[in-house]
Image (cartoon, grey):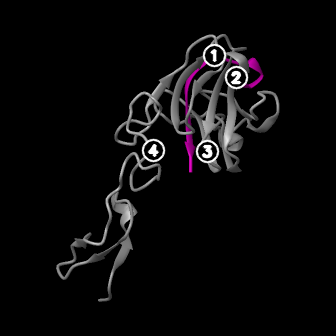
Amino acid sequence: LGTFTGDCNELGYGGGTYGCTDGCNFDTSACTPATCGNGVLEGVEQCDDASTLPGDGCDAHCRLETLVETEPNGTAATADGTPLGNILFEAGISPATDADWLVFTLPAASNLYLEVMETVSGVCAAGNLDSQLWVYESDGTTPVADNDDIDYTNGNLCSALDLPNLAAGTYYAKVNSYNGGSSFSYRLGMISY
């Protein structure tokens, strides 16, 4: 048998390399703990906004907090706001021609992943929700990217965007029903990495 090692992040630690003891138990003595609130995404943290204060989208245990939409938020000027790029936003499109806007700030250049999900199961079921997702520059009018369907061929009509290398600054996200076709409740997950 050889020596077995692995990345401590796989076990929820902040960093380091673990090994296998003689009895084939994990030796985590070289692992460093994840530190929530240090601004570095480590281990099993879902977010780390350099704060442990609740109510800002990232809780004291570095898990995403659910923020709930406040109407009216149908334009960039009336967008719901959060200072973070890591959130779980719960909202609804009603009537079918509604649009929900959210303004957020990336404190540093980063990659950003956004996904529209169903509220009941947390995943998009085939055909239950047909969303359109947009990200706009700080002026609220210049599109950065948009997506209609994650996987139209297999019936996943929810939307997702993976945006690499976004500059630090203010951005807007908009969710609407594709062609104003239906009303629905949803969650928008947003992670900067």
Q: Look at 35% across and 38% down and name the residue there.
A: 60
The residue under label 2 is 177
Which of the 4 image quarters holds residue 105? Answer: top right
Q: Position of residue 149 (x, y in %)?
A: 70, 37
Callout 2 amino acid: Ser
- Count of picture labels: 4
Nearer mark to the viewer, of 1 and 3: 3
Task: Relative to 125, say whether 26 is above or below.
Answer: below
Distance CA(mark 4)–CA(mark 1):
37 Å
Identify the residue at the far bottom of this view: 1
The residue under label 3 is 113
Front residue of 38/64: it is 38
- Whether label 4 touches label 2, CB < 8 Å: no
Q: Position of residue 126 (x, y in %)?
A: 60, 34
Nearer mark to the viewer, of 2 and 3: 3
Span highlighted in magenta in the image: 177-193
Task: Relative to 137, say whether 99 is above or below.
Answer: above
Circle nearer the N terminus (2, 3): 3
Q: Position of residue 167 (x, y in %)?
A: 70, 47
Q: Tag 4, which secondary structure?
A: loop
Distance CA(mark 4)–CA(mark 2):
35 Å
Which of the 4 image quarters holds residue 139? Answer: top right
Q: Is 181 contained in the magenta span?
A: yes
Neighbours of disc 2 within 10 Å: few (<14), some (14-19), many (20+): many
- Whether label 3 touches label 4, CB < 8 Å: no
The residue under label 4 is 50
Q: Tag 3, which secondary structure?
A: strand
The residue under label 1 is 183
